[in-house]
Image: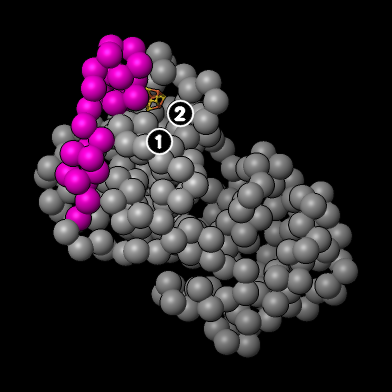
Amino acid sequence: MKANIQAMSDEAAFARLELLNWFSTSARIFPWREEEDPFRMLIAEMMLRRTRASQVVEVYRAFIARYPDAAALDRAPAPEVADVLRPLGLYWRAANFKKLAEELVSQHGGSVPRSRDELLQLTGVGPYVADAVRCFAFGETVALVDTNTVRVAARYFGFEYNQESRRKPAVIAAVTALVATEQPQESNYALLDFAATVCRALNPEHNACPLKLHCCHFQQTEAGHHVGVQETLARLSPAEPEHNWIEE
Ligand code: SF4
């Protein structure tokens, strides 16, 4: 995150603090959040793509009980792995999990690499999963930009968004501004949980929201206050984007 974004944005600083406060009492509990092992975090993130977290819990537990590390997954018969993944309807991803394990064992000694470039070389690992592993497993400060986090940023800062928005540097900067550099893991978990339970796509809980005081969407709809969209984006956009990756 660029330091000048933080300096320019009182709203962003307010949101970062409030999201962390909210998270301290409202965090969702998932087994992969109790892990420190990068392999297990990588497996969880791969399962979570396009799948509800509540659906993943039992499958993740069964999967890790059978395959606690890359070597165990590499040794497992492919049909058996597909069976474990069956409740998620991830038959088509079973081959990816097997290939991933083979790559981790043969190319990385059974460990998960830390660098973004190496993560992206792994089968089934796209930009979002790579950055989730970098943040949650290795503590790197990186914002997780997906449909849900873009929705929160767009409503809060007051800019239009659509399916393509997450590819825009200014939008990535807006999501990044909501992530605390000193607490990237808690901050990203907070944003993900907040998007899933408060600032939902449908029926967001505006009145119970800790961000409503500075939320453009809330102010526009509840108080009729207008915020300049382009001005907001311009203010949040770094002169040179720190990264310009797109989500898979
Ligand atoms: S006030 Fe409503 S739109 Fe704004 S961040 Fe909160 S839940 Fe989302």
123 up-or-down from 248: above or below:
below
Residues at badges 1 and 2 in contact (C-beta under 8 Å)?
yes
Question: What span is in magenta?
Answer: 213-238
165 up-or-down from 68: above or below:
above
Where in the image, quadrant-wise, is ligand 1 located? Answer: top left
From the viewer's side, name the closer residue of 190 and 72.
190
Q: Amino acid at mark 1?
A: Val
Q: Amino acid at mark 2?
A: Cys
Dot 1 or dot 2: first in sequence order is: 1
From the viewer's side, name the closer residue of 182 and 127.
127
Q: Can the viewer see residue 183 in this picture? A: no
Q: Which mark, residue 152?
A: 1
114 up-or-down from 147: above or below:
below
Regarding mark 2 in the picture, which secondary structure is present there?
loop
Q: Is residue 233 magenta?
A: yes
Q: Is mark 2 within 8 Å of ligand 1?
A: yes
Q: Which mark, residue 199?
A: 2
In percent of width and height, residue 156 lies at 32, 31
Regarding mark 1 in the picture, which secondary structure is present there?
helix
From the viewer's side, name the closer residue of 233 and 108.
233
